[in-house]
Amino acid sequence: MKTLLTLTKQTTSCLRVFPLSTASMQMFGVLAGLGLQEYDSAPAALFFWVPIGWFGSVISAALSFDFVWQLEHGQVPQIGRSLKRLQEKLLPLLLESLIIGVPIILGSLLVLPGLYFFTIYLFVPGLVMVRPPSPAFSYLAESTLLARGRFFKLMFFSAAVFVASYLSYLYPIPNPFQNASWEQTGTFALRFFSCLFLNGGINIFAGFLFARIMKGGNSLK
């Protein structure tokens, strides 16, 4: 419980001090999600938008991990620095997101397998960003190792992410260009920025969790 409160406090502080940076890093995932929800009724389009949505989410997570990593290592975090590192690591990050995306997305159809794979591969984006270039499956192995002994506690976090994703599907962001009105536009803005900060909170929390474990914090065990 003490660890949870500490991570929550760190996340809240980061959101308060760096609101624009935190929100802007989530644009990749949220905008890709908008495309996915717009075409979710067209089966053929899902083959395009599901990978795009997943890649966007992984990129947002990777940026957030790196942003927190800077903060936790005594630097003033800069989104420009994170974007530069993303540019350097983009190809291995996309490869890793493809490798872990298949079991997570397919497993999500049965819920529990998706939760399992999401939990053990939770730290892959962070490892790609902060580790030297390594063979593709070494990131998966290290993430699985980091989850060992903490699996069920980490799975609660994964379950919260799944619930948030499900709720965002139930209450999609309305398209402001269809039946445009002030009310529609206001609803769009409210839900869009809510998604930015919700995703930001989730990714920044995961970033602090990752940094804590990488530093050897054992209270999650």
Image (cartoon, helix red, strand yellow):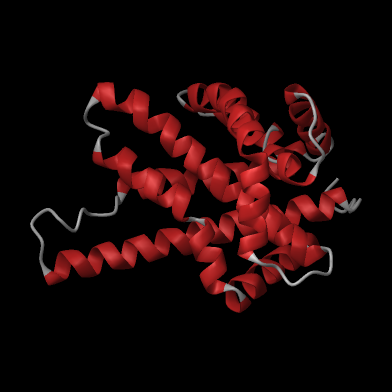
Residue depicted at x 51% and y 71%: 20
Q: Residue furthest bottom?
A: 17
Quadrant where the image shows the N terminus: bottom right
Residue 64 visible, this orientation = no
Quadrant where the image shows the C terminus: top right
Could you say which is closer to the camera, residue 140 or residue 164?
140
Residue 22 placed where, x, y %? Answer: 56, 65
Q: Is residue 167 left or right of residue 209?
A: left
Residue 105 visible, this orientation = yes
Q: Identify whether 62 is placed above or below 73.
A: above
Q: Identify whether 58 is placed above or below 180.
A: above
Residue depicted at x 33% and y 38%: 36
Residue 205 placed where, x, y %? Answer: 66, 58
Residue 186 placed where, x, y %? Answer: 23, 70
Give the total of numbered labels. 0
Could you say which is closer to the camera, residue 40 or residue 58?
58
Residue depicted at x 8% and y 57%: 179
Residue 58: quadrant of the picture: top right
Q: Identify whether 64 is placed above or below 193.
A: above
Could you say which is closer to the camera, residue 9 or residue 203?
203
Q: Is residue 88 left or right of residue 168?
A: right
Residue 212 placed where, x, y %? Answer: 82, 55
Q: Is residue 145 left or right of residue 91?
A: right
Residue 7: quadrant of the picture: bottom right
